[in-house]
Image (cartoon, rainbow, N blue to C red):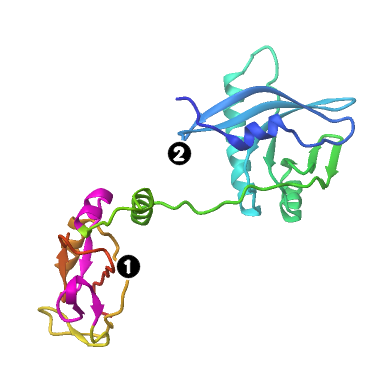
Amino acid sequence: MSPGPTHFRDEFWRNPPPLPRGVKLVQQEAVVVPRVGPRGASLYDLAEVQLPESRVPVLLGYRAPLFPADVLSQREKLSALREQLQRRDADPRSLPAFRLPMLVTDSASASVIDLCEREEVGLIDMRGTFFLRTGSTFIRVQGHRPLERTPREPLFHGKGCRLVRVLLQSSDRRWTIRALSEQTQTSLLLCARGHDETPQGRLRRRRPQRRLPASGSGVTASGMADERQADSLHPGRIQRSIHDPGVAQQGSCVADLPGHPLDLHTGERPTLR
């Protein structure tokens, strides 16, 4: 299975951060590890930190952003992978090379740097921060290069996205509820009895604070007839929710209202408290 795109890893090697004087990082081999989740694989790198008087083999793992709680779990993953690589590359005629686990991130906080130092995990960030301790070698440099982070905006998806996309693409069309429901694969739950009136095909609230008896249970529901978002607008889910035990059935499931203009639509399913 081929790994999906790894934007941060690619950006790190395409535009590497400034390293301390006399230090060079050389990429040697990419390691693909299958995993459960998006893209189905994680990418690591075998690399070598070249110093003026020595060379340190390292195993690079990528994590951006990196929080203190992530350091220990990432160290365990790198240690487990290191053991697998040692067994893979075992040569009875020589000792296996010990690779120091090293994390690569975008911007490491002071708490992350301190934790990496305590746990003996190497660290590099895109601002130029560099930490390495092994044998007689100890390097700790705080980077200060400006970093422009890509804002992590929440994705707009689901029923609302489908509705907005269709309406924007056909702004000159006057949609009916049936046509829009079919086009976006949604439906509507309308309280058509007891709380809503439809004069001239439009919906409006009526007696919103009326207390509702629970159907068939004899228990009084204290929920007000306020507007709320349904958990799902698919017809099957709405129909099942109406017949759930303990739910006051004061509305009906309406998949479409032919010919009615989409001026206002409300959804409500009163529940017991």
* Nearer the camera: disc 2 or disc 1: 1
The residue under the point 59% across, 35% down is 7
Density class for disc 1 (Cα within 10 Å; few <14, some 14-19, many ≥20) is few
Task: State the residue lying farthest toward the top.
Answer: 93
Across and down, in percent, residue 243 comes to 14, 67
Foreground pick, 83 / 61: 61
Q: Quadrant of the C terminus?
A: bottom left
> Hey, which quadrant is residue 237 in on the image?
bottom left
Query: As drawn, is 66 to the left or to the right of 120?
Result: left
Q: Amino acid at mark 2?
A: Pro
Foreground pick, 102 / 241: 241
Q: Who comes first in sequence, dot 2 or dot 1?
A: 2
Task: State the residue lying farthest toward the left.
Answer: 216
Residue that label 2 marks: 38
Residue that label 1 marks: 229
Callouts 2 and 1 close, C-beta under 8 Å: no
Check residue 244 in the rendering and tell me which mark sits there, or answer none: none
Q: Is residue 119 magenta?
A: no
The residue under the point 89% across, 33% down is 21
Q: Is residue 117 above or below residue 263?
A: above
**Secondary structure found at label 2:** loop
Q: Is residue 187 above or below residue 226?
A: above
> Hey, which quadrant is residue 271 in on the image?
bottom left
The residue under the point 27% across, 70% down is 266
Q: Is residue 272 above or below residue 175?
A: below
Across and down, in percent, residue 137 comes to 85, 35
Density class for disc 2 (Cα within 10 Å; few <14, some 14-19, many ≥20) is few
Q: Amino acid at mark 1?
A: Gln
Q: Which residues are magenta?
A: 178-205
